[in-house]
C-alpha cells in the first residue's frame, strides 16, 4: 500500500476496534512540538516550566493558575486554546470522536487545529485509495486553495505555496519578470503525470484542473462520500453537476461561507447577485443510498452541495458543514 500525507501525523496513532484513530501520547507530544506551542527564547519561566512538564507527561492536568502565571498575554491565550483542545481529545479518546463532538457543539478549535484533525481523519478515511485525483482533490478539505484561470480552465493550487512564491517574487524582481504567474510554473495534474503526486503528496505542489478535468470533480465527490462514510457511517452517492439550472435547492449544504449565502438565496427563490453566482465553482448532488439514514422530510430528494471561491479567488472548504448541515434521520 502506498504511503501519503505523512505530515498528517496518522502514523503517531493506532486504530481502535472501530477503525478510528486513538489519541496517543505520541500524538499529543507532536502537537506540543509545533512552533505555535514551543516557548520562544523570550518566554517566561512559567511557560517554559509548563511546556517541559507536559513534554514529560502530555496528559498531565493543567491548573488555570499555571497559565495565568505566564507573563505574556498572547502566550496565555495560546495555551488556553491548546489545553482545551488537548483535553477534548483526551476525553473523546479518538480523533474522530473529538472532531465530531467539537463540530456538533459549535466548539470548533482554531482553524490550525481543526485543519490538522481533518487532515488526520481524511488520511484514515482514504487509506487504501489508489486514485491521485481523489487524493489531490481531498486536499481542499484541509488546505485552502488559490483559484486561477490557466489555459482556459479553472485551476486550483495550494494557497500557502502560491503565497510563498509571491513573497519570493516581491524580493526578487527578476524572478517575477521570468515567472509573472506563480500558478503557471506548477505542474497541473493530468493522466500522464498523476503518478508523480505520490512522491510529493506532502509538498502540495501539484495544481488541480478543476474546471476542465472531470476526474478532479469526480475525485472531490468521492472524497466527500468517503468522509461521510468514515465519520458518520452514511452511505451516499455524490455526483458532480455542470451548473445550477433546473435544480430544486430545497435541500442544500454550502461547503463554505459564500456557497452558503448562494444556497440561501436559491432556497428562497431569489436571483443571487451576479458576483456571487460567478464565484460558484462546484456543484454536487448527494443521494442517500440508505433512505432510512435521511430525514423523512427529504422524501427521496437529493441534497445539493455548493462550493464557491471568495472575491479574492480563495477556496476555503468547510467539511464540518457536512456534519451539521445534512438532513439526517437521527437529527429529527
Image: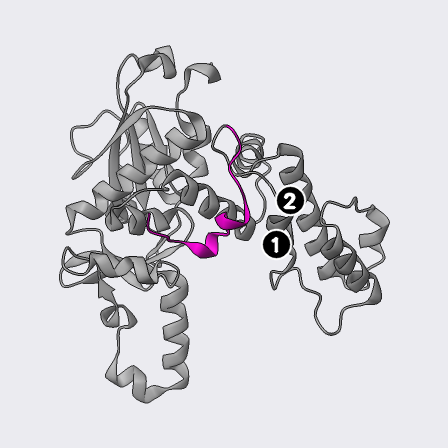
Q: Number of callouts in the render?
A: 2
User: Is 78 left, or right, of 150 in this rendering?
Assistant: right
Q: Position of residue 326 (x, y in %)?
A: 39, 26
**Residue topped by disc 2:** 85
Q: Is residue 105 magenta?
A: no
Q: Is any atom of residue 125 visible in this view?
A: yes
Residue 104: x percent and y percent? 54, 30
Q: Relative to the observer, which residue lies in front, 101 or 256?
A: 101
Figure quadrant of residue 185: bottom left
- Considering the whole magenta stretch, tell me its main secondary structure: loop
User: In terms of image quadrants, where is residue 48?
Assistant: bottom right
The answer to whether residue 6 is left or right of residue 244 is right
* Dot label at residue 31: 1
Residue 7 lies in the magenta stretch: yes
What residue is drawn where x is 33% and y is 29%? 252
Q: Nearer the viewer, residue 327 or 40?
A: 40
| Residue 147 visible somewhere in the drawing | no
Q: Earlier in the sequence, mark 1 or mark 2?
A: 1
Question: Outermost residue toward the front?
Answer: 1
Question: Residue 176: where, in percent of width, then height?
Answer: 30, 82
User: Residue furthest toward the bottom?
Assistant: 174
Helix, strand or loop status at disc 1: helix
Few, some or many C-alpha atoms within 10 Å of disc 2 (few <14, some 14-19, many ≥20)?
some
Which stretch is magenta?
A: 1-17
Amino acid at each position: 500500500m502506498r504511503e501519503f500525507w505523512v505530515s498528517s501525523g496518522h502514523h503517531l496513532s493506532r486504530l481502535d476496534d472501530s477503525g478510528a484513530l486513538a489519541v496517543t501520547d505520541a500524538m499529543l507530544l507532536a502537537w506540543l512540538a509545533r512552533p505555535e506551542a514551543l516557548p520562544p527564547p523570550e518566554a517566561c519561566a512559567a511557560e517554559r516550566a509548563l511546556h517541559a512538564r507536559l513534554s514529560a507527561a502530555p496528559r498531565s492536568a493543567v491548573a488555570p493558575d499555571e497559565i495565568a502565571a505566564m507573563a505574556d498575554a498572547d502566550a496565555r491565550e495560546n495555551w488556553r486554546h491548546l489545553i482545551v483542545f488537548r483535553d477534548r481529545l483526551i476525553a473523546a479518546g479518538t480523533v474522530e470522536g473529538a472532531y465530531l463532538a467539537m463540530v456538533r457543539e459549535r466548539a470548533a478549535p482554531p482553524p490550525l487545529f481543526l485543519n490538522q484533525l481533518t487532515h488526520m481523519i481524511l488520511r484514515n478515511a482514504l487509506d487504501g485509495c489508489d486514485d491521485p485525483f481523489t487524493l489531490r482533490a481531498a486536499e481542499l478539505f484541509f488546505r485552502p486553495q488559490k483559484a486561477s484561470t490557466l489555459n482556459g480552465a479553472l485551476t486550483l493550487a495550494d494557497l500557502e505555496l502560491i503565497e510563498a512564491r509571491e513573497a519570493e517574487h516581491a524580493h526578487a524582481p527578476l524572478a517575477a519578470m521570468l515567472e509573472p504567474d506563480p500558478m503557471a510554473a506548477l505542474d497541473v495534474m493530468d493522466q500522464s503525470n498523476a503518478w508523480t503526486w505520490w512522491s510529493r503528496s506532502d509538498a502540495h505542489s501539484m495544481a488541480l484542473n478543476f474546471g476542465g478535468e472531470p476526474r478532479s470533480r469526480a475525485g472531490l465527490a468521492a472524497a466527500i462520500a468517503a468522509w461521510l462514510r468514515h465519520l458518520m457511517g452514511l452511505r451516499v452517492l455524490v455526483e458532480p453537476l455542470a451548473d445550477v439550472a433546473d435544480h430544486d435547492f430545497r435541500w442544500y449544504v454550502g461547503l463554505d461561507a459564500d456557497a452558503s449565502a448562494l444556497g440561501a438565496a436559491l432556497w428562497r427563490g431569489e436571483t443571487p447577485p451576479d458576483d456571487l453566482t460567478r464565484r460558484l465553482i462546484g456543484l454536487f448532488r448527494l443521494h442517500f443510498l440508505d433512505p432510512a439514514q435521511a430525514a423523512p422530510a427529504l422524501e427521496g430528494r437529493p441534497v445539493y452541495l455548493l462550493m464557491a471561491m471568495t472575491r479574492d479567488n480563495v477556496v476555503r472548504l468547510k467539511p464540518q458543514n457536512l456534519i451539521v448541515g445534512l438532513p439526517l434521520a437521527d437529527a429529527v
